[in-house]
Image: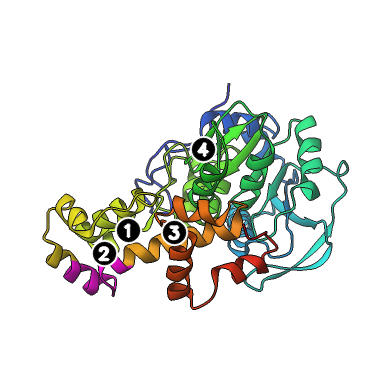
Amino acid sequence: MRKAPLSSGASPYGFDGIETTATIGRETLLICMDQIPDNTANRNAKNTPITFEIFIQNSFSDLEVAAVTSVLDMANRILERKQFHWEFVSDTPGLVEGRCGMIVRAQPLIWDQNLKTFLVVTGGNGIKLDAWLPRVRAMRRQSAPVVLLSDAATAFIREWRSTNAAVATHWYDVWILEETGSYPNLTRRYAAVSEGIVTSAGLNYTPELIITLIANLISPSEYMEICNRLLVQSIRDSRSEQPKGIGYLMSAFGSKVSGAIEIMEANIEEPILPKDIANRVNVSLRQLERLFVKNVGIPPARYYRSLRVRKAHALAMETDMTLLNVALATGFSSVASLAAAYRNEFRKSLQKTRKSTGLKIR
C-alpha cells in the first residue's frame, strides 16, 4: 500500500519544519490514490491530466472557488507544467454569479457523461441537492472521489441519512442540524469521509483540503513548496474539532474575555448571570465589564443577549422550527420577549423577516 508523502523535513525552498503530518485521514487519501496514477509514473507522464470538476450554483461561495483554483494553479506553477486542470459546471450553465460578485462561466452538467478525476461541489446560498446528487452517484459508481464543501455538505447530510460513517460540515451548520434533527454520525471535524464522499467544513479550510488531496501526486518538496508559497504553515488535522465560536479567538480578546464568551456560547438555551460568568473566569463583575467594553465595545450582558438573538435569527431563517421553539432554544421565555430583543438588535420585525424567507410563521 502506497503512503502519501507527508513527512516533515527541510525544504529545498527554505521552508523548514512545515507541519505535514496532519492529513484528512488515511482513508480519504487511499480512496483518492486508488483512482489516480502512481506518483512517480504521473510525474514522468507529464501530459497525464488530473481534472477537478467544480460544480457551482447561483450565489456560490467565492472563497471556496478561489481556494480550489488557487491551489491547483500554484501546483502547476511549482511543477512548471499544467498537470492539474479544472472545469466549472452548473445546473444553470453560462455566467454564474457568486454571493460576493465573482462571475464564472460554467458548462452544462450531464449527469453520467465525461466524468473527471475529482468532483468538488462548493457551498453557497440556495444549494439544490437534486441538481448535483445524480452526478455524485455517477462518480461513486466509478469509485471516483467526491468532495462536498460547507453548505453542500450540509445539504447532503440533511437528506442522505443512510451513511454509517462520520460526516462533517461547518460548525455553524452542525449546530443548526443538531437543533433540528437527529444525526448520530455528525461530527465537528474539519473533514470526514463516508462511502467515498468527503464532507468538509470548506470555507477557509478548503486550501488545506485540496493540498491534502493532491499530496500523493507530487513529491514531498513540491508539496511543501505549495504550502510555503500559499503561506500555509500547517495542515490542520481533519480529525480535529473545528473552533466553534468567537470565544476561541483568544488572541483577539485576551483569555478572560475569550473564556467568558466560551461560557456564553455553551449556555445559549439556559443563560447564566454575568456575575456567575465573572466568577468562573476568576474576575469581578466590574472588571469583566471593563474588559468587555475595552475589547468588544459593549458590556457582557449586552453581548450575551446579542449572541442569543443572532443564534435565534439563524434558527428562524434557516429552519422550520416554530418561533416558540426558537425562543426556548435561545434562552427566551416567550416569542414576545424574543421579538422585542430581535427588534432591538436588528431594527426590524422578527415575524416579517421570517415571512420574507417563505417559511410559515408559527
Q: What residue type is labelled 2?
A: Phe
Please give the label number shown on residue 249.
Answer: 1
Secondary structure predominantly adopted by residues drawn in magenta: helix
Q: Give the range drawn in magenta.
A: 289-302
Q: Quadrant of the N terminus?
A: top right
Measure the C-alpha gap from mark 2 to mark 4.
30 Å
Q: Is residue 44 visible to the viewer in this orientation of the structure? A: yes
Image height of 251 relative to 168, above or below: below
Percent position of residue 316, x then y = 56, 59
Q: How far apart are marks 2 and 3 (CA)?
A: 24 Å
Query: Whole-Å distance between the Cαs marked 3 and 1?
Result: 20 Å
Q: In front: mark 1 or mark 4?
A: 1
Between discs 4 and 3, the one toward the N terminus? 4
Residue drawn at 44 percent across, 40 percent down? 237
Q: Nearer the viewer, mark 4 or mark 3?
A: 4
Marks 1/4: CA distance?
Answer: 24 Å
The residue that appears at 28% across and 73% down in the rendered structure is: 298
Residue 61 drawn at (x, y percent): 63, 61
Q: Please tell me whether residue 154 is drawn above or below residue 143 in the rendered image.
A: below
Under circle 1, the secondary element is loop
Q: The residue tagged with tag 2: helix, strand or loop?
A: helix
**Residue 144 percent location from the top left of the image:** 73, 35
Q: Using the image, tell me which numbered label, if any, was put on residue 253.
A: 2
Q: Mark 4 sits on what residue?
A: 24
